[in-house]
Image (cartoon, helix red, strand yellow):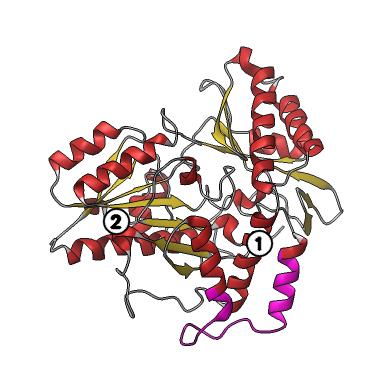
């Protein structure tokens, strides 16, 4: 596989796939691989879901792009569907999670400007990941991703994830905070969840209400049914002012969204922000088709049931080795002993078990299977992962 003309920005695995169906990917010689990563939480409905495929085909033959100089009927419909699902008031459509997060962070700056701040800061978390545009990268904790890019560190205050006392200390130490930006579960950081679970989000909202800050939640990875609710924050009584999402939003089609309510309502007006490709007729119809699948099926409950089955099955077998699990729904972290060498697990799973996985946070196997994974497929994920891990523990 040659990549002669491609910039070397990815450490690509020595394999490529030519087609996909449901939970499976196939190479050119038709070898099947069980996909427990789904494009990093993107293809939540599975590869080539019939309803999404039909929507793409019909819209591609009808109208792909006009620009936001004109009304876009499918964008209106997608916006209504998404805001109803998210309990938000209005939405800006972008092309990716990073763009959605960039919009949110720009909004925080505008909120501070309108309050008369000369300079403002946003509270973000250690081990967070928010994207690779300059502002979203500055909010991101990963030092390897940040190195060499002169990140805008003075615009952010980084505190430990799950530590509400650190939020209050930041409020004492700084009088120019305008917002908190947080992931309900830290995907890239190792599937980290707060000690008190989603209750943490309610504590963060209370702090924002108390200090008149924007409460902004990044659900790029946790949204669109991944944790068993349409959005992960809905496991709590919290209500964000700004909510971002992408990944599963288009089931493989590139699209992102930044939604607002509460203190963020009305911040953006004409000319405040924009995107040439944001919310095209094609992208918007895909968003609406994904919404319809999630709304009219039991797929989110299946995510809860099968995710719990996978976690319980693996940890029951490997508990004696100090293996535990975390996450919610089909956002699954299998936590291995830190002394274990995890560097080859991805390759071994692919080459020996025909299983696609990921390792994040150094020693956490990240599983992001389809939300509609069948029980026999869940059993295969467990069997193949146990066959891989037992000889190594």
Q: Considering depth in this image, is 31 or 248 the residue closer to the camera?
A: 248
Relative height, residue 380 to residue 240 (above, below)? above
Q: Considering depth in this image, is 137 or 162 the residue closer to the camera?
A: 162
Residue at the location (71% across, 30% down)? Answer: 385
Relative height, residue 71 to residue 169 (above, below)? below
Q: Secondary structure at mark 2?
A: loop
Which residue carries the number 1 mark? Answer: 292
Label 2 Cα neighbours within 10 Å, binned few <14 / some 14-19 / many ≥20: few
Return the x and y of residue 307 as percentages of the image width and height: 65, 36
Relative height, residue 124 to residue 291 (above, below)? above
Of the numbered discs in the image, which one, if any, rests on residue 150? 2
Position of the N terminus, as image quadrant, is: bottom right
Return the x and y of residue 244 as percentages of the image width and height: 44, 57
With 198 as the anchor, is 279 left or right in this view? right
Residue at the location (16% across, 59% down)? Answer: 119
Q: Is residue 147 visible?
A: no
- Which residue ends up furthest to the right in the rendered image? 29
- Which residue ends up furthest to the top in the rendered image? 320
135 magenta-colored: no
Q: Which residue range is magenta in the image?
A: 52-76
Q: Picture quarter containing residue 48?
A: bottom right
């Amino acid at each position: 596989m040659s990549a002669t003309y491609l910039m070397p920005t990815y450490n690509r695995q020595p394999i490529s796939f030519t087609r996909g169906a449901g939970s499976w990917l196939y190479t050119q010689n038709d070898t099947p691989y069980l996909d427990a990563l789904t494009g990093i939480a993107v293809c939540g409905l599975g590869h080539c879901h019939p309803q999404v495929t039909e929507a793409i085909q019909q819209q591609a033959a009808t109208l792909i792009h006009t620009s936001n100089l004109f009304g876009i009927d499918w964008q209106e419909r997608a916006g209504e569907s998404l805001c109803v699902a998210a309990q938000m008031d209005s939405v800006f459509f972008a092309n990716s999670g990073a763009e959605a997060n960039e919009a949110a962070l720009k909004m925080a700056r505008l909120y501070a400007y309108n309050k008369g701040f000369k300079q403002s800061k946003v509270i973000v978390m250690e081990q967070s990941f928010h994207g690779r545009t300059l502002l979203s990268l500055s909010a991101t904790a990963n030092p390897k991703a940040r190195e060499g890019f002169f990140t805008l560190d003075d615009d952010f205050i980084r505190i430990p994830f799950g530590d509400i006392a650190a939020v209050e200390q930041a409020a004492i130490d700084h009088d120019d905070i305008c917002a908190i930006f947080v992931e309900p579960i830290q995907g890239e950081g190792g599937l980290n969840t707060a000690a008190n679970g989603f209750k943490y989000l309610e504590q963060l909202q209370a702090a924002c209400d108390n200090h008149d800050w924007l409460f902004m939640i990044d659900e790029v990875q946790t949204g669109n049914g991944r944790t068993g609710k349409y959005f992960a924050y809905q496991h709590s009584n919290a209500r964000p002012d700004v909510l971002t999402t992408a990944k599963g939003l288009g089931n493989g089609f590139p699209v992102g969204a930044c939604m607002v309510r509460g203190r963020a309502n009305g911040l953006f007006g004409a000319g405040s922000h924009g995107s040439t490709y944001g919310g095209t007729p094609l992208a918007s119809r895909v968003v609406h088709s994904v919404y319809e699948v999630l709304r009219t099926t039991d797929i989110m409950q299946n995510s809860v049931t099968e995710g719990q089955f996978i976690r319980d099955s693996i940890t029951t077998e490997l508990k004696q080795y100090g293996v535990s699990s975390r996450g919610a729904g089909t956002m699954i972290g299998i936590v291995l002993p830190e002394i274990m060498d995890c560097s080859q697990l991805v390759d071994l799973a692919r080459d020996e078990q025909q299983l696609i996985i990921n390792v994040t946070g150094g020693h956490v196997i990240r599983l992001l299977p389809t939300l509609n994974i069948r029980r026999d497929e869940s059993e295969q994920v467990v069997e193949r992962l146990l066959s891989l891990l037992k000889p190594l523990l």
